[in-house]
Image (cartoon, grey):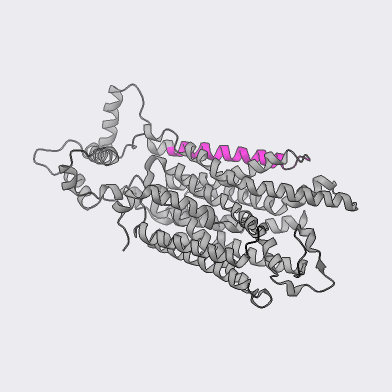
Amino acid sequence: MALTLQQAYHRRWWMACTAILENLFFSAVLLGWGSLLIMLKHEGFYSNMCTGENRTNGSALGLPPHHWPSCVEQEEMLNLGFTIGSFLLSAATLPLGVLMDRLGPRPLRLLGSFSFAVSCALMALAAYDPPVLSPLIFLGLSLNGFGGICLTFTSLTLPNMFGNLRSTFMALMIGSYASSAITFPAVKLIYDAGVSFSTIMLTWSGLACLIFLNCLVNWPKESFPAPEEANYTKKIKLSELALDHRVTGDRFYIHVTTVGQRLSQKGLCPQGGMELCPSTQDLCHGATVPAEYSIPLRRSVCSPIFLWSLIPMGMTQLRVIFYMAAMNKMLEFQVTGGSPDVPEELMEKAEDTVGFYASIFGVMQLLCLVTCPFIGYVMDWRMKDCVDGPLGTGATMAAGAGAEKSPARPRYRKIQKLTNAIRAFTFTNLLLMGFGVTCLINNLPLQFLTFVLHTMVRGFFHSACGGLYAAVYPSSHFGTLTGLQSLISAIFALLQQPLFMVM
């Protein structure tokens, strides 16, 4: 049986820590495609497409010789599977967002963990007889991308239970998602140590079943409301609040804040009146949803903030994806100078250099997990010092009376959220500009800085966008808006293919 919001609130730290680990090892692992491609070719997937004329030497890939041939046609077919899986990793966000707003995160997370477990099992099955079962890799990669985005998307609502630290925890969730590109390179190390591909995939499938069990036991059926709604803490029995003289911390603060807001909106209570009843009713039966959170979805979609956010998000997504596709070519150009006639020794040096820098780039993906909380800290800057904005005439009068007593002007939460979001987007765009400059400079050691900037931008721009939507729009619209933005950005990022062909 699913937990209630009150029960889940007490387990929020366990849920957050496990969600970060689950995102790190089970979400966007397809972003480490380069390492998986080498393993699939070494296992002989689609090797039957290679004839005697189009075969390539397996030693050119840095692998020991083996009996499976490899060729360009094989790599193109496997990359088609990656294209399908990576497209689902981005394009499935819109329908998932709509479903999550209606059903909550629990059923989608169960579906995602099940899909990931099946994907690993299918790849393990296909490895037993690659010439016959190679087509299963398409279904396996598709389910891998779909399951990964389900786990990522559902974890983005979990930070709502952490109040003023919401943006920081959201940054951790996105950082663990972005850092999951390191998973397949780590798996390749285990593979190179002698563990069979089927054993690795079956073990991974079993670990995904633990995610299913964890979600079944610890995740509530209801969606996580925003801190402003705070239904999981307001739904407290009145008798419990009245009889427990040790009520402190968040529960006491929320109760006092709720009563204070009621008084400021409705003025002083008449003798024998019922003005305090809504507050006690909120504690017993749940708070009434403010008009701010009952706005239609169409209004949120057509708002200037959302529409303008699509432009920088689409451009950033295109820039990041294009660099990941063209990085090897750019590094090779810096070694060979772009000469059409390259000596064999220089070509070998270029291959070694590209391999070394590609490995460093893969390891640096872990920086997303380290640097993403910084942008969350920017989004949460001075939120504890803020008060709720005026909600009516009574609140305005109360704020005026408070201003006469206190020399400091009150800082309103809504304004502070927007200010922090502007700072986060500005900082991310500055990093993107720096990345665009350093990647064009013909200096190999400087590319380490380019890798760092690329990793930070890849983690920051999702965190900044998610924090902005969580701050401005109702929590019931978060999934749909984030999904729509991701879908539009994914479509815009398809331009990287013609750009790559022109390059």
* Residue 144 in which image quadrant: bottom right
Direction front: furthest residue: 194
Q: Is residue 468 above or below residue 122?
A: above
Q: Which residues are magenta?
A: 417-442
Q: Quadrant of the N terminus?
A: bottom left
Which residue sits at x=28%, y=47%? 233
- Image position of 199 (left or right of 331): left
Q: Main secondary structure of the magenta part?
A: helix
Q: Compare residues 257 and 239 and report the one nearer the observer.
A: 239
| x and y percentages locating residue 298 in the rendered image | 43, 56
Q: Position of residue 31 (x, y in %)?
A: 61, 56
Tell me the residue at 12%/38% (across/down).
270
Residue at 47 percent of width and 54 percent of height: 481
**Image quadrant in which you'd find residue 130:** bottom right
- Whole-percent x, y for residue 457 in the image: 60, 44
Q: Residue at x 21, y 53 (%)?
A: 285
The one nearer the camera, 258 or 455, is 455
Please tell me how many numbered marks the rendered image carries.
Answer: 0
Query: Going by the image, does 78 lie left or right of 338?
Result: left
Residue 189 in sight here: yes
Q: Is residue 104 left or right of residue 445?
A: left
- Is residue 275 visible in the rendered image? The answer is no
Q: Nearer the viewer, residue 422 or 177?
A: 177
**In magenta segment, residue 423:** yes
Residue 161 shown in magenta = no
Is residue 486 shown above or below 129? above
Q: Is residue 93 above or below residue 385?
A: below
Residue 255: percent from left, percent from top: 24, 41
